[in-house]
Image (cartoon, grey):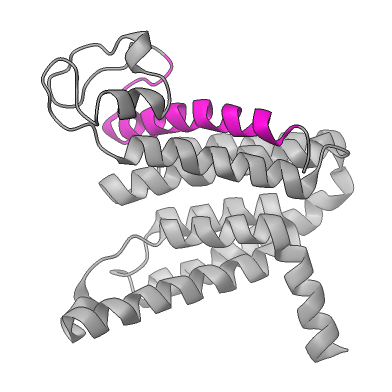
Amino acid sequence: MNALMPIAFAGGMLLGSFAGVVAYRVPRGEPFMTGRSHCDSCDAQIAAYDNIPVLSWLLLRGRCRSCSEPIPIRYPIAELTMAAMFAATVGVLGTADLPELALGLIFCATLVTVTLADLEKRVIPNGVLLAAAVAAVAIVIAAEPSSLPERLIAAAGAGGFLLLAALAYPGGMGMGDVKLAGVMGLYLGGAVVPAMVVAVLAGALVGLALMALHGSGERRRAIPFGPYLALGGFVGLLVGDEISSWYLDRFIG
């Protein structure tokens, strides 16, 4: 086990808390860099000792100290998810290539943030995607400029694929999904192909399961696709190149 994984886990919990703030405030047009954290129900400011990732939620038994209204469980889940993703990314990518590791960690933070926003508000914030895209291009230009053409092609291909899906079925795919796919291409390069396959398969399996449980009427229910893209993106980050190599060796020879 990489010795930095526990540090990455702790850092992931802290950034997971911040991701929850960004996902809540950005779609509502609220500033996320200023202003104290506050209760969603009574608007009371949250003290620092009540804002410790995961631990505070457990000690408060999931309720606001001021009004006793439930604190959404998405907050500790986001913190633990980000922590696990950071630790796994450090464990798989290692620390020999710091620019690659930085890309991986920023990518994980982006995926968690857009997933939270998409699940709650059915929107993938443009500001988050733009910041992620700028960070990716800047790091690649500084550290590995030769890979930029491949990443740009991957971004255009992944985004174009979902754009066609959005045009063919406007009610089932949003432009936020298209933009997220493009950002995934910037971070993953060629590994975006298995990432997209995982996302589509996961979305299809969940859709089929919902239809089996609730009937064919579920086909008309809008289901956010961002979380499936995030799942595929994380798989692509960790093992996308290995999946591509296995497929090419197995079926192309």
Q: Is residue 153 visible?
A: no
Residue 210 drawn at (x, y percent): 27, 76
Residue 196 drawn at (x, y percent): 57, 68
- Identify the residue shown where x is 22% and y is 80%: 213
Instruction: Please tell me whether residue 112 is drawn above or below residue 61 in the rendered image.
Output: below
Task: Pick whichever, 159 or 96, lies toward us.
Answer: 96
- Identify the residue shown where x is 19% and y is 17%: 65
**Left or right: where 40 falls relative to 181:** left
- Identify the residue shown where x is 42% and y is 56%: 226
Q: The magenta stretch spans which residues?
A: 4-33
- Identify the residue shown where x is 42% and y is 48%: 115
Residue 130 drawn at (x, y percent): 54, 38
Instruction: Please tell me whether residue 109 is drawn above or below residue 52 in the rendered image.
Output: below
Q: Identify the image quadrant of residue 166.
A: bottom left
Q: Identify the image quadrant of residue 234.
A: bottom right
Instruction: Please tell me whether residue 204 is drawn above or below residue 32 in the rendered image.
Output: below
Residue 121 drawn at (x, y percent): 27, 46
Q: Quadrant of the N terminus?
A: top right
Q: Main secondary structure of the magenta part?
A: helix
Specify whether residue 163 is painted magenta: no
Specify whether residue 28 is painted magenta: yes
Tally the numbered discs: 0
Q: Is residue 62 visible?
A: yes
Q: Quadrant of the C terminus?
A: bottom right
Instruction: Please tell me whether residue 209 is drawn above or below residue 99 in the rendered image.
Output: below
